Structure formats: structure tokens, C-alpha cells
Amino acid sequence: MMSLALAGTLGPPPGARAQEAPAPRTTSPMGAAAMPTSTSGRPLTIQEAETIAIKNNPQITVGKLQALEAREFVREARSALLPQANLSVTAVDSEAGNRISAGYLTNPTVYPRAAAGASVSQLITDFGRTQNLVSGSVFAAKAQDQNAIATQQQIVLAVDEAFYNTLETKALLQVAEETVKARQDRVDQIQALTNAKLRSDIDLSFSKVDLARAKLLLLESQNNYEASLSTLSAILAFPDRQDFVVVEPPSQATPPAVDPGPLIQEALNQRPEVRAMQNDVAAASKFGKAEHDLWWPTVSAAGVVGAAPVRDDHISNWYGAVGVNINIPVFNGFLFNARAKSADMETEMRRKQLQDLQDNVARDVRNSWLDTQKAYERLSVTKQLREQAALALELASARYKLGLSSIVEYSQAELQETDAELQDTDAHYQYLVTQIMLAYQMGTIR
């Protein structure tokens, strides 16, 4: 929240009719935001900002690519269930009848030949191991899809926060500009009265001090507005600051929910991070089952066929064979046991991470709901503050006009009125931001 503690227009001293104090300002807290400080830039609504960010932000593109990559891993795992076919061409020149004597237990005979053929193999069953690997990769791909959604929601949240921060800084800049103009008019007025010997030099000094403070505040407000535009441009993936004119969206301050319980339950069902972790747990569980299935036999079939147009006389001009192979694991140095236990521990770790994430989501939703409740109650408080400050300024203006108070009292009343107006404006935008944050924590932001 930015606090702008400056007085507005100060009236002349009591006396002649031409020296009456000016009427207090009646600008509504949202009036400043309704008047843009610049009309030369490109108008930008919050929907357009979200669309641009989703289209251009590189983090969203990375998330989508990771999701597409995970889907290819599913195809990779499923390929083990499909036939494997190969074509081979072999040409050998050797002394007829030579045998390979080293490196193998068998000593096959090598004949000179030139041949071509095809081989096909097909997994018949491994008692569910490959299917578990496929299922695990499917769950992992679903987790990546949810991670991509989570990344998009984070970008949308950042865009909305930057957008409303730009709106607020623009409103505060407008107030600062109006304050400088009012202070300058007051200095000119008191300068003329001082030259006419109707006011003292101390009144002129007070007004010039207030003008200097207003100019300092204007510089700070301009810097904050420029910084907010730079932040918004960066989130929208523009390398340079864009001269946007953010458009105030139609909004109504609706009261928050009475009970956070249903909100927490909805968050546990909707948050993409929770869904991603649930899929990660399922993927780890499927992988663990696949690791336990390593001890089951593997049954596969194979077939070959081909021709040898150039060959030794001991070789026929074609060949072909089919067969079934059963591979039964017996002992491998406890490798499969270690892999199965490691997978089980990974699954349990994922379950605990899911539990921790659910606890954190429930906490974040409850805290966001409390922030929304506080921000909503602040709306009525700042509205009352603004009304009372306006009434106090009106009374101070009447007292100053009747000569019952000094310039200090009137200046202080304008200071309080200006600060109350800024507080009310800030309360409005802060409540909108807390609503957006609550929607994000619930996983319903779009």
C-alpha cells in the first residue's frame, strides 16, 4: 500500500468575499482511476493481458513442451508390447569351413556368403510388468499436463497482480497530479494576498513547503507507475516497457464466503499441483509393481526368413525358422530385490509429499480467505474514514472562512481528507487482489 500524505487546496484567509476558502474536494476514491494519466498508449484490458501472457510467456511454452515430451515417453513404454521387425543384409568372405574358436562357448562355422532376410519378435507375456510401465508413464504424462496448467495459473496470477498494481499506481499518480495543481494554485493565491499585505509570510512559507512535498510525492508516484508498467510488460514477454493504458474492469465488491471449509475442499480437488502429485503417486506405484514383476518369467516369440543368393555349397539358398523363448530369472546378485525396495520407498516418499502438499494447500486457502475477509471489512472502514474526513474538511473550511482557525488547521484537514481518499482507493484494489489470490489458491483462476 502506498501512503500519500499531502494536503490539497488551501483557502485564503478570512476576510473579504473574494478570499473565501475553496470548497473541499468531493472526488470519489475511484474517480482518479477513471481518468487516465495518458491517452497516447495502447488500451489494455485484463482479459487481453492474460491472453497475451498465455501466448507469449516462455514459461508456459516450456510447460507445454514438457507435457508433450511426457506423452512421447508413453509411446516409448508401449512400444515393448508391439512386434519388433528388422531387415538384415550380410556379406561374409572367409575360408570355407573356418570356425570361430575364441570368445564363445560354441564354435560356429563361418562360410562365405551374401544373404538378406527379415526377423520378427513379439513379447507374449511378462505377467504385467510392461503394462505397469505403460500405466506409470501415462500417469506421469498426466502429472506433466497438470504441471503445465499450474504454470499457466501462476502466470495469470502474476499478470492480474501486475495489472491491478498498475491500475492502483495510476490512480495514485492522478491524485498526486491533482494535489500538485491544487497546491500550486494555493501558493499563487497566497502569494497575491501576501503581496497585498493581507497574509503574512509564514502562510506563504507553509504553502510553499506543502507544494514542495507534493512535487516530491508526484516524482515518487511517477516512478511507481513507470515501474508497474515495466513489470507488466515483462510478464507479458515484451523486452521493452510498453506504454499501456490499463482499462479499469467492471467489478463489484462481493462479500467473501462465510466458511472456508468448502473452499479448502474445492482447492484439494481443483489445484493442479495436487492433481499432479496424485498422478506422481500413481506413477510411482505402477513403477513399483513393475519392479516387483522382474522376478516373473518373460515369454516371447521370434521368427526369421531370408535368402542367400551367393553362398557356399554347404548353405541352402533360403532359410526360415520360428520359435518361443521363456526367460526365467534365478539369481542376479539381489539386483531385483534392491530395485523393488527402492521403488517402494519412492512411492512412500511421494505419498508423504502429497500429504504435505495437501496440508500446505489447506493452510494457504485458509490464510487467503482470512486476507479476503480483512480486505472486505477494510472497505467499509475506509469508506467511513473518507466520509468523516470530507466532513471534517468542510467544517475546517467553514471555520477558516469565518476566521476562527488558522491555515494550519485547514491544511491538516485537507491532509487527512487526501490520505483518506488514498486509503479508500488502495482498499478497493487490495480487495480485488485478495480475491484473485484466493481463486489461485483454490485452483479456479483462469
Image (tube, rainbow, N blue to C red):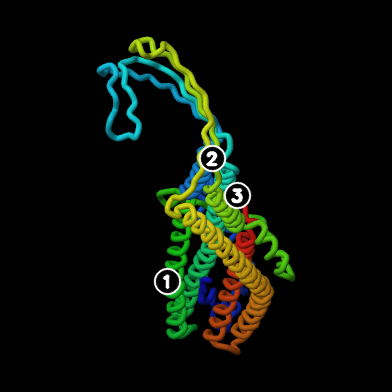
Earlier along the polypeptide chain: callout 3 or callout 2? Answer: 3
* Residue pointed to by mark 1: 216
| Three-letter amino acid code at the position of disc 2 | Thr
Which residue: 56% across, 41% down?
126
Q: Please, which residue is most extreme toward the left here?
A: 95
Residue at 38% over, 14% down: 315
Image-quadrant location for residue 374: bottom right
Q: Position of residue 117 (x, y in %)?
A: 43, 18
Residue placed under numbered mark 3 in the picture:
47
For the residues marked 1 and 2, what is the alpha-carbon distance in whole angstroms? 80 Å
Q: Is residue 441 above or below residue 193?
A: above
Tell me the residue that label 2 is attached to: 298
Q: Amino acid at mark 1?
A: Leu
Task: Report the side of 284 relative to 250 (left or right).
Answer: left
- At x 38%, y 16%, the residue is 115
- Under circle 2, the secondary element is strand
Task: Give residue 348's position: percent from left, percent from top.
Answer: 56, 62
| Residue 385 visible, this orientation | yes
Viewer-nearest of labels 1 and 2?
2
